[in-house]
């Protein structure tokens, strides 16, 4: 946390990145908020606005050192701000899965990183039919 605060106050372009990302997120959130207001009222409008700004700032700070071009960085931030509701819902789903089954979540995550299909787990010996339980006509 201290490194992030030190970076914020020692590197002046970091504040500019936060500000530009927030503005892009604000415009994307306003656009989504207009649609949300028609369907969800003022609560949907405010939620879309705040989600757009929050996701844009997080993404802007996250790609700060990796994307050198300002135009490309703002394009990525804008695209993420447009789909911010989906990103936010995905993060909430990941958090819920982690909360409900932490060990199973870690196993599925490691399998996904390793390129394994978690659905193709060999059946448990407990689920195999017993010899005395054969199909009888």
Image: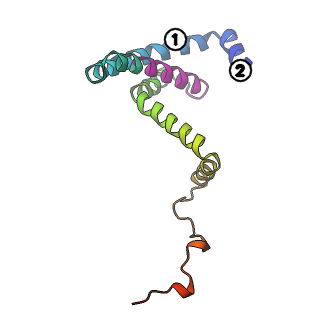
* Image height of 92 relative to 78, above or below: below
Q: Does residue 98 belong to the magenta stretch?
A: no
Residue 23 left/right relative to 68: left
* Image height of 109 relative to 131, above or below: above
Residue at the location (56% across, 87% down)?
131
The extreme bottom residue here reads 137
The image quadrant of residue 13 is top right
The residue tagged with tag 1: helix, strand or loop?
helix
Q: Nearer the viewer, residue 41 or 80?
A: 41
Residue at the location (55% across, 14% down)?
18
Q: Residue 36, percent across and down?
A: 31, 22
Location of the C terminus by quadrant is bottom left
* Image height of 74 relative to 108, above or below: above
Residue at the location (48% across, 37% down)?
90
The extreme right residue here reads 2
The image quadrant of residue 67 is top right
* In this rendering, the label closer to the viewer, 2 or 1: 2
**Which tag, 2 or 1, sits closer to the chain's start?**
2
Residue 91 left/right relative to 31: right
The extreme left residue here reads 38
Residue 116 left/right relative to 28: right
Q: Which of the colour schemes (rainbow, by chain, secondary structure, one colour) is used?
A: rainbow
Q: Nearer the viewer, residue 7 or 121?
A: 121
> Which residue is under mark 2?
1
The span shown in magenta is 49-67
Q: Residues within 10 Å of mark 2 (few under 14, many from 20)?
A: few
Q: Does residue 64 belong to the magenta stretch?
A: yes
Q: Residues within 10 Å of mark 1 (few under 14, many from 20)?
A: some
In space, the residues marked 2 and 1 are separated at their CA atoms by 20 Å
Q: Residue 91, percent across and down?
A: 51, 35
Q: Residue 21, percent across and down?
A: 49, 17
> Which residue is under mark 1?
19
């Amino acid at each position: 946390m201290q490194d992030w605060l030190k970076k914020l106050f020692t590197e002046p372009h970091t504040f500019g990145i936060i500000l530009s990302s927030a503005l892009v997120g604000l415009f994307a959130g306003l656009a989504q908020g207009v649609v949300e207001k028609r369907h969800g009222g003022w609560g949907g409008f405010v939620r879309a606005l705040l989600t757009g700004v929050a996701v844009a700032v997080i993404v802007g700070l996250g790609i700060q050192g990796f994307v050198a071009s300002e135009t490309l960085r703002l394009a990525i931030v804008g695209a993420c701000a447009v789909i911010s509701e989906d990103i936010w819902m995905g993060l909430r789903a990941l958090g819920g899965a982690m909360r409900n089954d932490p060990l199973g979540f870690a196993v599925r995550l490691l399998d996904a990183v390793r390129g394994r299909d978690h659905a193709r787990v060999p059946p448990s010996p407990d689920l195999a039919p017993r010899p005395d339980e054969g199909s009888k006509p």
